[in-house]
Amino acid sequence: MYIYGKTFGIVYKNNTMKKVKNSIALIALSLLTLSMSQCKSTNKALEENTPFNIQEAYFQSWIAGVEGGGSGINVFIPVTNLEEGVSLEFIYFRNNKAKLEVKPQNTSLYIGYFLTEGNTRKADMIMSGNGLDEYGNEVPKVQKDIPFELKANEAIIEYNHNGEVKYMKVNLEERESVAYPSLESPKN
């Protein structure tokens, strides 16, 4: 028995028409599945051509000189040729996100400040069968899940260009750590 296939304008045997329709359905389903299951790093589009240039971006670990004074990583983003209508907002680095701040004395240098667990005082935790006794305990910190997969020396800069949020990836150079002799925090 022959059936006329309206889709292709050709005469097919009954079995062949079913195979063609099944193949088309399978291809459409595959494309739909692939488009919905993009990998984590492509959820947000990364820009190739940006309205600014970055010169020698780097990060530097620090530790306070007093016990319990804290530690962290500062990421330095020197920017040139920043177009009007562009503002650098956030940086994603090592599964964390920080606001990018510009130094008033150097408006071409943006810095992201990340605090780490090293050299911090551990608060006393009260464990009791009575929940009211545990009221003052500090809430545990939860690891953030950023929308990018990055290597240890990579970061994503989130910037605003004329009202539109955009992203770019940068490679960072690691500089020698700094030990501050008696500061509580180097963010000054």
Image: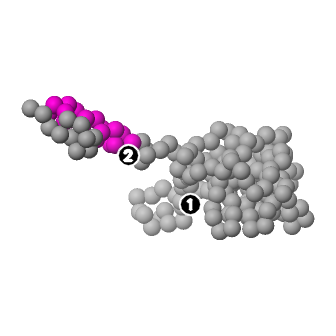
Identify which amino acid the numbered label 1 is placed on. Glu
Q: Give the range drawn in magenta.
A: 12-33
- Left or right: 163, with 58 as reference point: left
- Image spot of residue 84 (x, y percent): 78, 67
**Residue pushed farthest right?**
105
Residue at image position (63%, 64%) is 164
Residue denoted by label 2: 32
Quarter containing the N terminus: top left
- State the SS at label 2: helix
Q: Nearer the viewer, residue 160 or 141?
A: 160
Q: Where 11 sits versus 108, above or below?
A: above
Q: Please state if 109 lies on the left or on the right of 35 as rendered.
A: right
x and y percent of residue 93 in the render? 67, 48
Label 2 to label 1, Cα distance in Å? 45 Å
Q: Which amino acid does label 2 sit on?
A: Leu
SS label for mark 1: loop
